[in-house]
Image (cartoon, coloured by chain):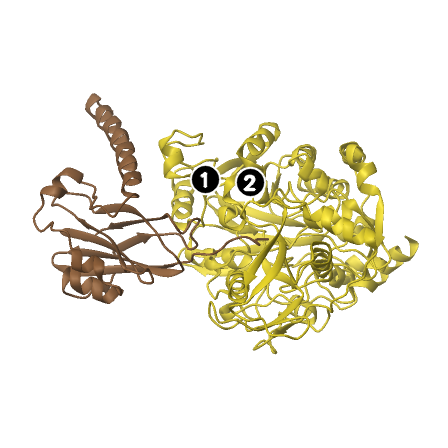
Amino acid sequence: MTATDDQFSEFSATRRLILKGAIVVTLTGLGNFSFGAVPALAAANDKWPEEAFKQKGQADAIKALYGKTAEASDKVKLDAPEIAENGAVVPVSVTTTLADVTSISFLVADNPNALAASYNIPPGTIPSVANRLKMAKTSSVTAIVEAAGKLYSATKEVKVTVGGCGG
Amino acid sequence: MTIRRRDFLKFAGAVTLSGGLSRAARAADNARVYDLERFGNVRILHMTDTHAQLQPVYFREPSVNLGIGAMQGKPPHLVGRAFLDRFGIRADSADAYAFTCLDFEKSAARFGKLGGFAHLKTLIDRLRGDAGSGRALLLDGGDLWQGTGQANATQGADMVDAANLLGIEAMTGHWEFTYGEAALRKNLERFKGEFLAQNVFLTAEAAFNDAKAFDPASGRVFKPSLVKEIGGHRVAVIGQAFPYVPIAHPKRFTPDWTFGIRDDELQKLVDGLRNNDKVDAVVLLSHNGMDVDLKLASKVSGIDVILGGHTHDAIPQPITVNNPGGVTLVTNAGSNGKFLGVLDLNLAKGKVSDVRYRLLPVFSELLKPDPAMQALIDKSREPFATPDAEKIATADRLLYRRGNFSGTMDRLICNALRGELDVEIALSPGFRWGTSMMPGQPVTMQDVLAETAITYPETYVQSMTGIQIKDILEDVCDNLFNADPYYQQGGDMVRVGGMSYTCSPNEGAGKRISALKLDNGRTIEAGKSYKVAGWASVNQQKGTPVWDVVARHLRSGKRADGHDTDVTLRGVDDNPGLSNQG
């Protein structure tokens, strides 16, 4: 291993911690946070999508945000718990092997407003996003990846339970 | 004792074996039921969910254990006669007594208690010796430290001593976590084996604050696996803790840790052990529960055998599951020390070439207690012997807990809550541990604690609306009957007192519970408030511990005033997970 590699891995470790810190910060609101944080703000088409966040239903939110529909894809890898340990902070993450990713969004179908977060992904950024969702009740969680102008999705049911009475 | 020995002779066929000696050969001498012919080059002994029962126990297997959807009619969801038929066990045999609820009282009188760590120790040592020096491995699947008043009072420390004397080489956990991180770590410092859990990670906050972890890079709190050299072969054991600890129990016990099934991480671990560590066999020591293990086995490749627990299913033969990488065998080894799993592997380079599995009932009448273990048990019991041995009542019927919806023990607990706390409705958790008591048997504090000893025993009394009560029942019911096992938690239905309801297990979430009525026949109304008592709440409560409430009720000599709880089942008439016994 070369000195450069060492520096790089140290840098990576530090960067991961900073990112973790940043993710905790996003808990306080639905800010537009993404992995390439600073460049993202400079990306084109970064206007706050007010209409999309206002929609109640999932289909309407996707339409308002993207103006098209998504197809399910096994190239979108959504990681979410089967049963939430705490419905108020449900950790979810998305990675994808799709090329030319420009945006990643999370939707909770049965939340009062389905769209929970949307991230712009600048060119050259690894398309990997982690987020927490507030969920009042059991619902499907959908991740949308916009890549090369098309929409792809993955969906998983996350159960929110009152807990207790385990064996 | 003489009579029982004769019963064993007469009804030999004791100990269901998949393979091995013919039944006729074993019938010759009851002492030989534990003589297993030699097979393979590695022997793995598996115990699980003993719930700290150091002494032999009675434990009635369920008469209701419904499987829903694809799980219907398949192990472990078979009871009574259907269970005997599936596994080729003769009715009226010692095996039928150990594995099913059939004729429980009659058979208990004939075949006696099962389990007990001194008896287990004798059996384990014998099976180790038979395998040859250094060729056996003893694993515990968790729920070792909880289930008695003594274990609760010592926070599981008594069980660490027993585990060390037994020679447990690796374990995973579930109720172990309910003692909290400090007590858990203190016990593990003294534990001579390894505590394995691939699916417990630091929360993001805890990782950020540099909380203690086995592997800070991945956030894994515990060592995920070990590799053991046995007879020139390399065997990997991966630990899988109960995936839903912070949901099934108060989150305050494990604030820094996050759990889950995590089959992606598991797959990576298996691949690493196969490709980098060049192991010859991979065994998953699991506390997932059997339905979860069966699904996991279909998704994750490269595991040879899953040694399972949690759901307390005593399954005599492994279930074969196909997955993209080949085949995985899934077992579940019962509870309360009643059984010992014996997995004999014939290992070749990089693979398991043949397997033999037996689930041996631990008939305490047939095993001489190990003196060293008996001395340890007696000594550890000393501080508790006097206060806990006082007789406070006599069992007026068979008292048991296990079953999807109710049992006589929980009816008694619900009656105690209603009688002592002056409420209309009582709720009691559907735990699967808790020993059985014979009619006429004296009930001591030790017996009451064997049904109730947890770290959050406080009772509560509160007002709930009809819709809140229905929502609780629906929520727990979905944890039991969700068609996807990954969404189940593995307990049984919450028990109710003072009310009845209808349950349709095949329906979807939120649609299974109907016709809620009070014992006086009045319908429970959605908007109306009712006074409800319960215990084992995941929210912090301040009431009297439930064991004191139950003891007070028993001492008062009051008989149950309400009639027995009725749960009417819909849509399960043909389900072989339902027996007409009990």
Q: Can you give x and y, in whole percent of width and height, for residue A26 in the image? A: 27, 42
The residue labelled by disc 1 is: B257
- Residue type at mark 2 is Phe
Marks 2 and 1: in contact by CB < 8 Å? yes
- Element type at mark 2: helix
Same chain under badges 1 and 2? The reply is yes
Residue in the picture at 27% in, 50% down? A94
Compared with residue B466, is residue A120 higher up or lower down, i.e. above or below? above
Q: Can you give x and y, in whole percent of width and height, for residue B249 in the image? A: 54, 47
Left/right of residue B146 with respect to residue B540 in the rendered view: right
Residue found farthest to the top: A3
Give the camera-side residue of B442 and B362.
B442
Residue in the picture at 77% in, 65% down? B561
Shown in yellow, the chain is B
Left/right of residue B13 with respect to residue B191 in the rendered view: right
Say which chain tag 2 marks: B
Q: Can you give x and y, in whole percent of width and height, for residue B60 in the image? A: 73, 59
Task: Please give the label number shown on residue B177.
Answer: 2
Give the camera-side residue of B311 and B307.
B311
Q: Quadrant of residue B94?
A: bottom right
Q: Is residue A6 shown to the viewer in this render? A: yes
Shown in brown, the chain is A
